Each structure stands twice: as C-alpha cells, then as structure tokens.
Amino acid sequence: SASATEASSATSPGVAGGVARTAVAVGLAAATACVVEDVLNDLVLWRICVARASPVVESHPRLQRSLGAPFRVEPWWNGSVSSRGNGNLASCVYLVDGERASCDVQVVLVRAPGSAHAYVPNLVRNLAAPEQWRVARMEAILPHEKTAGLPGRVNLLQEPEPKGGVLANQKKRAKGKKERWRGVKRWFWRSKGDERD
C-alpha cells in the first residue's frame, strides 16, 4: 500500500503538468488564429476599398493632371485598415503612385448590421458578401498641392467639375427654380396691371 501511495503521488504532478502544457498550447493556438484572422480580414477590406476606389481614381481628371497616369497602387502593407462598430464601419488608406507624384486615398465603408450575422466572423462575411459594403466617404489627399499650408483634398464622390460638382449643380438648380418662380410672379402682376388699365 505504501508503494501504491508513492506511485500515485508521483503520477499526479506529471498529469497536472501535462494538462497545463495542453492548456498553454491551446491558448497560443487560439491567439495565433485570432491574429491571423485579423490580418486576413484587413487584407480583404483593403482589397474591397481598392476595388471600389480604383475606377474613380483612374478616371478623375484632376488626379490624372496632378499625379500623371498611369497609376500604380502600393502593396497593402504600406496602407492602413481599421474597423469599428462590430466590424460594420471600416476605414482604409492606401497609396497611389503616378508618373509625377503620389497621393493617399481614403475610403470609409459602412455596412448595415444584421442579427443573422451576429455569430459569423467578419472575415467570412467579407469574403462571402463584399457587396454589402457601401462607400460613405472617398477622397484623395495631395501633399504636393498645398493651399494655406494644408495638403489638397479631392472629394472623389463628387463629379470631377471645377466648381463643386454635384453639390454646386444642386444649388444652381435650386437657384434656377427660384428665378423662374419670380419671373412667373412678375408676369402675373404685370397682367393684373394691364387688366386694370
């Protein structure tokens, strides 16, 4: 009985040590998997941002004049990607090189949260349904074009027109409607005056 007691006491530390080593190995594997998932998710988001922005950048007249075509996108590790709001808000910055100069392109993407995807990893969701992302902001920052000491910024969501693009056209249309309404009112009062005469 004494020998059995000694054997069991000798075995207990070995079992405890094995369990501890297994727990450490599982923890390290889980941490590594999380890091790898984050890196791959950033890469997928970067590719989505570049795919959405590249057609706009390559066809934008001001960027063509400022940077010089053709354009080349720097590798993803030279950019930055961040996400918030349970992965439903993403911001990406990547570098575009032209023949004469380079610029940063910033893209902000938003995605509607869904309870059906609450337990689906963001990497899987981004790979399966990249079309769920909507562009909220897209602009180019031109360090070599400075106004008042600040880099030039180009809103790529506006039409490439010199006087403000879509927003300016909306204001012009509203102003045109007001002018037409004033003309109608002037014509009405003129006709009323003619009837009195």
Image (tube, rainbow, N blue to C red):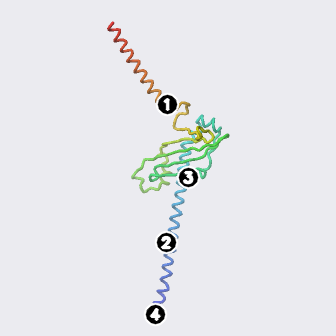
Of mark 1 and mark 2, the one earlier in the sequence is 2
Q: Secondary structure at mark 2?
A: helix
Pointer 1 residue? 168
Of mark 4 and mark 2, the one earlier in the sequence is 4
Where residue 153 sits, quadrant-wise, is top right
Pointer 4 residue? 2
Pointer 2 residue? 23
Q: Nearer the viewer, residue 92 or 49?
A: 92
Q: Secondary structure at mark 3?
A: helix
Measured from the top left, where is residue 25 in percent x and y?
Answer: 52, 70
> Up-down: is 180 above or below 153?
above
Of mark 3 and mark 4, the one earlier in the sequence is 4
Residue depicted at x 55% and y 49%: 46
Disc 4 residue type (three-letter) = Ala
Kindly report which numbered mark, 4 or 1, lies closer to the viewer in this rendering. Answer: 1
Of mark 4 and mark 1, the one earlier in the sequence is 4
Q: Is residue 182 left or right of residue 33?
A: left
Disc 1 residue type (three-letter) = Ala
Disc 2 residue type (three-letter) = Ala
Of mark 1 and mark 3, the one earlier in the sequence is 3
Pointer 3 residue? 43
**Label 2 Cα crowd, 10 Å radius (few <14 / some 14-19 / many 20+):** few
**Label 4 Cα crowd, 10 Å radius (few <14 / some 14-19 / many 20+):** few
Measured from the top left, where is residue 102 in percent x and y?
Answer: 63, 43
Q: Which quadrant of the rendered structure holds the C terminus?
A: top left
